[in-house]
Image: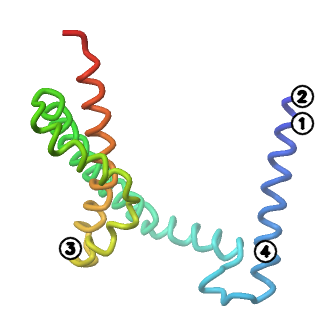
């Protein structure tokens, strides 16, 4: 039974790569926009060999870690503050709920305006995308603690 499921999964991904290759060969889009699987694999090997792949991965992880650290620190403090001070919850609580519904991609234009095309903008979008969820979950958790 498990071999059958594994075979189906492998077949699915093989078909997916073949469809990708067929679309790439049809020249609907230029190769710089829609490269073939071979070109992607070739570039992956090249960037892995010269170290730029791992540098890029490290940079992305650093941005993610800083953004999430800011979101966790700010969200926990704000969530506890909202749970313990009713006036803060009544004023800021609805704002936090409203801002949480904004998708992260909507913050990108503001990030570009405020930070330009820098790491700061990426960290801002990461932090702002997570801080409201952390705040609401911290608030809920603190409110549900038995006194």
Badges 2 and 1: C-beta atoms under 8 Å apart? Answer: yes
List x then y, in percent, for residue 32: 60, 86
Badges 2 and 3: C-beta atoms under 8 Å apart? Answer: no
Locate the N terminus by quadrant.
top right
Q: Say which quarter of the image contains residue 30.
A: bottom right
In this rendering, the answer to whether 72 lies above or below 29 is above
Disc 2: which residue: 1
Say whether disc 3 or disc 4 marks the residue closer to the N-terminus: 4
Say whether disc 4 or disc 1 marks the residue closer to the N-terminus: 1
Q: Say which quarter of the image contains residue 113.
A: bottom left
Circle on res. 21: 4
In this rendering, the answer to whether 83 lies above or below 124 is above
Q: Residues within 10 Å of mark 4 (few under 14, many from 20)?
A: some
Marks 2 and 3, Cα distance to the nearest angstrom? Answer: 54 Å
Marks 3 and 4, Cα distance to the nearest angstrom? Answer: 39 Å
Marks 1 and 3, Cα distance to the nearest angstrom? Answer: 51 Å
Say whether disc 2 or disc 3 marks the residue closer to the N-terminus: 2
Q: Secondary structure at mark 3?
A: helix
Marks 4 and 2, Cα distance to the nearest angstrom? Answer: 31 Å
Disc 3: which residue: 115
Identify the residue shown where x is 69% and y is 88%. Answer: 29
Q: Secondary structure at mark 4?
A: helix
Identify the residue shown where x is 29% and y is 37%. Answer: 136
On screen, residue 1 versus residue 89, left or right, reads: right
Disc 1: which residue: 4
Badges 4 and 1: C-beta atoms under 8 Å apart? Answer: no
Compare residues 111 and 35 and report the one nearer the observer.
111
Identify the residue shown where x is 22% and y is 42%. Answer: 93
């Amino acid at each position: 039974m498990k071999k059958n499921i594994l075979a189906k999964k492998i077949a699915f991904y093989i078909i997916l790569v073949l469809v990708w290759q067929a679309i790439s060969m049809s020249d609907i889009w230029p190769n710089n926009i829609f490269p073939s699987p071979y070109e992607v694999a070739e570039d992956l090997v090249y960037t892995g060999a010269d170290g730029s792949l791992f540098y890029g991965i490290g940079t992305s992880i650093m941005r993610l870690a800083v953004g999430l650290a800011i979101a966790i620190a700010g969200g926990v403090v704000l969530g506890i503050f909202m749970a313990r001070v009713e006036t803060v919850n009544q004023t800021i609580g609805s704002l936090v709920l409203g801002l949480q519904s904004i998708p992260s991609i909507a913050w990108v234009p503001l990030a570009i305006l405020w930070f330009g095309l820098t790491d700061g903008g990426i960290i801002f979008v990461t932090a702002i995308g997570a801080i409201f969820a952390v705040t609401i979950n911290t608030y809920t958790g603190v409110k549900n603690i038995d006194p």
